[in-house]
Each structure stands twice: as C-alpha cells, then as structure tokens.
Amino acid sequence: MTTKQALNIVKMKKMKEEAVPLTMITAYDYPTGLLADEAGVDMILVGDSLGNVVLGYESTIPVTIDDMVYHTRATARGARHTFIVADMPFMTYHGSIDETLRNVRRLMQEGHAHAVKMEGGLEVCPAVEAIVKSGVPVLGHIGLTPQSVNQIGGYRIQGKDAADAQRLMNEAKALEAAGAFGIVLELVTEQVADAISKALTIPTIGIGAGRYCDGQVLVFHDVFQYASPYRPKRFVKTYGDVGAMIREGIGNYVKDVKERAFPAESHVFLADDDVLDNLYGDTKSERVERS
Ligand code: KIV
C-alpha cells in the first residue's frame, strides 16, 4: 500500500507553473482533519476562523496562540498526510521578532503545522522575512483581513478602485519578495485577483476572489452549513447540509428517548438468569409464577 505524501511548497509552485489548481479547506479538530486528509485535499488551514465557527466569538480577535496550538495539534493527529497551515492569531506577530518566532515555534513544534499564515501587507514583511529565514514557510493573507476588521470598517470587498487595486498588488509583490510561499486573497474583485495571480510566481489562494486564483480555500463550516442558523455567503458553494442533518438527528434522538423507543432490545446487553437469581434471591420460574 502506498501512503499519500503531504504536498510541499516546491511542488505547489510547480503546480502553479503547470496551471494545476490548489485546494485548501479549513479544519479545526481530529475528525475534520482525518476526513479532509482522506478526501485528498492539498492543504488544510487551521484558520483563526476557529474563533467564529467553533468557539462562538463574534470575530477572530479573541483567538489566542494557545487556542491555535491546541486545535492545530488535534487536526494534525487526523491529517497525517496533508500539508497543514496554522494561522498566527491576532497580535502574535506584531511585537518583537523574538516573540513572533516563539509563537511560530509553538505552532510548529507543539501544533505540528508545516507552515504558518499571517494577515497583512507591507507592515508584516519584516516578520515574514524573519520567519522564512528561520526555515518556516509563510502563507501571506491580504484583501479582507478579518483581524483588522475594526480598522477596515467591516467585511468589505477589496480592490474596487484603482488605488486599492494598486495597494493590493504592491502588498502581494512585497510578500513574495519577503519569501512567502503563497498568498491568500480574501474578498478581492476577480480582475484584481487575476492580475495579482499573473504578476506573482508564487500561488494565490482565493476565497471570494474569483475564478483565476491559483487555488481556492473555503471554511469547512460554510461548505457544510455546519452552524445553526447558517448564513449563505455569495462566494461559497455548499456541498452538504450537515447542520440540518445534525439538528434533525438530535431531535429524533430526544424524541426516541422521551417515547422509550430508544434503547430497543437490539441495543441492550443481557445477563444470564443465574446472575438475576442471585440478585433477586429467587429463581426465574418463581418470579414468573408470582407475576
Ligand atoms: O481563518 C480562516 O479560516 C482564514 C480563511 C478565511 C482564509 O483565514
């Protein structure tokens, strides 16, 4: 039996040259990591979207490095043959380079990630350079960067005017020069994402950034409507309604227990009659006679 080998950043660049699209999905725990691994996705992102879709926060800002290490490690236990990228959470790469590298070390050594992802443009390039120099691959992330949502003023489409398009292009080129192995483009107009993808030698991975990126990433909970209630998003294609399935399943379980339809005879374990004779102090035939 051949074991699937995790992809690496050299092969990813080659895939871009050969116009083979890269696939990425988020995962945050062992079962999802295992399923994504079995399904053959190229990369798993343990995103800080964890904050929204798993931990129930309003934004990604409260997510800590401890949260990311814990969930990356759980995911890695399941996804043994897939390249795993872990998000650097809010403010864990804006202090000193020493502090940044300490956080990267935790995601790699304790979380077992293969690479880290960081949001931001020119301002994060020195950190990207330092991390890459230490031997860790970095995935950039520009466009809508949820950790800066309070500064951006909401979840808006990026690259709608000429100045913004140029800013995104400059950021992408600077991240490539700093050593990033790829860049996530989130909520970017299709034409601008296309121009950036053509201008770079490293792959772009789009989410809400149109058809011409070198790869695509989606959030697992969006793809499978794994939330209650699920909010449809224009840029997401769904491949199942796990939320409805689980809600209905739990409802049926509750009903069965209330109506004593579960457990049924097929679910129980029976002891031998002599065990009961001992417990009740009489025999089965005496008990039947009395009843
Ligand atoms: O945290 C995340 O899931 C992400 C994706 C939206 C790219 O950063």
Image: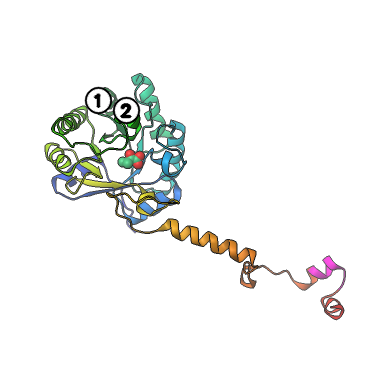
Give the percent coordinates (x, y) of residue 74. Answer: 45, 43
Q: Is the N terminus in the top left, top right, bottom left or bottom right quadrant? A: bottom left
Tell me the mark number nearer the camera, choosing from 1 and 2. 2
Q: Is residue 272 left or right of residue 76?
A: right
Give the percent coordinates (x, y) of residue 136. Answer: 30, 32
- In the image, residue 258 sits, relative to residue 53, either above or below, namely below
**Crowd class of label 2 (few under 14; some 14 to 19; many from 20; radius 10 Å):** few
Q: Is mark 1 within 8 Å of ligand 1?
A: no
Is residue 85 among the parts visible in the rendering? no
The image quadrant that residue 126 belongs to is top left
Judging from the image, what secondary structure is the residue with disc 2 in? helix
The image quadrant that residue 50 belongs to is top left
Q: Which residue is mark 2?
A: 151
- In the image, residue 10 sits, relative to residue 247, either above or below, namely above
What segment is highlighted magenta in the picture? 276-282
* Residue shown at 12% from the left, 37% from the top: 199
Circle nearer the N terminus (1, 2):
1
* Residue shown at 36% from the left, 32% from the top: 88
Give the percent coordinates (x, y) of residue 139. Answer: 27, 36
Give the percent coordinates (x, y) of residue 80. Answer: 38, 48
**Amino acid type of the residue that numbered disc 2 sits on in the rendered structure:** Gln
- In the image, residue 47 sits, relative to residue 275, either above or below, namely above
**Crowd class of label 1 (few under 14; some 14 to 19; many from 20; radius 10 Å):** many
Q: Is the C terminus in the top left, top right, bottom left or bottom right quadrant? A: bottom right
- The quarter of the picture showing ligand 1: top left
Give residue 125's mark.
1
Q: Nearer the viewer, residue 7 or 167?
A: 167
Residue 279 lies within the magenta run: yes
